[in-house]
Image (spheres, rainbow, N blue to C red):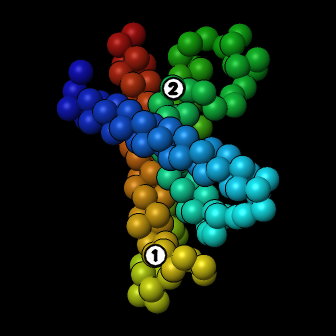
């Protein structure tokens, strides 16, 4: 296994674990807020905290989905094609996907820099949103690396025949 492959798989694993931990924290926070509401109280800032924590969950879920090929695909159409053609089609789809995520990542990085200069924070709790925006950008970079990894795997398989 190459260094790039180990690095991508390890990073995706840590990101998935971080996303799962934040998802559990979101569920606990929502449950606690529901219990507080039963007794006539409310936890201030719950919505803000959930909004910023879900960014971490989504940011790392994308790369986990891509590396394990759990995304929606068109297997019903491609299953009857020869393996070589399927791999070429997958590489074309990977290229389109990679360009898409690079553009979103580039735009997100630009927005993050702009918002950091303005000192963006949540309304009620005044928590800086910038670290969460940075995690989102890191998640987008990670999905781009996973797409490169999957494409290189396909190219090795194509070249092996």
Give the x, y percent position of residue 130: 44, 72
Residue 88 visible: no
Q: Nearer the viewer, residue 149 or 118?
A: 118
Q: Secondary structure at mark 2?
A: loop
Drawn side of residue 43 relative to residue 144, left or right? right
Q: Quadrant of residue 53?
A: bottom right
Residue lying at the far bottom of the rendered structure: 118
Residue 152 against residue 11 in the figure, above or below: above
Q: Nearer the viewer, residue 159 or 66?
A: 66
Residue under the point 43% across and 58% down: 135
Residue under the point 62% across and 69% down: 45
Give the x, y percent position of residue 62: 54, 42
Residue 122 visible: yes
Drawn side of residue 41 relative to residue 15, left or right? right
Give the x, y percent position of residue 71: 63, 32
Q: Are marks 2 and 1 in contact (CB under 8 Å)?
A: no
Give the label on residue 87, or none.
none
Lower sequence index among marks 2 and 1:
2
Residue lying at the far left of the rendered structure: 3
Give the x, y percent position of residue 141: 41, 53
Give the label on residue 128, or none.
1
Residue 5 against residue 116 in the figure, above or below: above
Residue under the point 53% across and 16% down: 84
Residue under the point 50% across and 38% down: 20
Give the label on residue 68, or none.
2
Q: Residues within 10 Å of mark 2 (few under 14, many from 20)?
A: few
Q: Nearer the viewer, residue 147 or 143?
A: 143
């Amino acid at each position: 296994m190459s260094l790039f492959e180990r690095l991508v798989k390890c990073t995706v694993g840590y990101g998935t674990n971080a996303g799962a931990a934040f998802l559990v924290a979101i569920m606990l926070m929502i449950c606690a807020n529901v219990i507080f509401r039963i007794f006539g109280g409310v936890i201030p800032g719950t919505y803000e905290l959930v909004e910023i924590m879900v960014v971490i969950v989504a940011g790392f879920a994308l790369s986990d989905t891509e590396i394990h090929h759990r995304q929606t695909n068109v297997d019903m159409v491609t299953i009857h094609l020869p393996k070589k053609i399927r791999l070429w089609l997958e590489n074309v789809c990977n290229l389109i996907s990679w360009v898409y995520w690079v553009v979103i990542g580039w735009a997100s990085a630009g927005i993050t820099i702009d918002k950091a200069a303005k000192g963006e924070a949540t309304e009620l709790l005044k928590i800086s949103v910038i670290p969460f925006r940075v995690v989102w950008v890191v998640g987008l970079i990670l999905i781009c690396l996973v797409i490169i990894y999957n494409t290189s795997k396909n190219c090795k398989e194509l070249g092996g025949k």
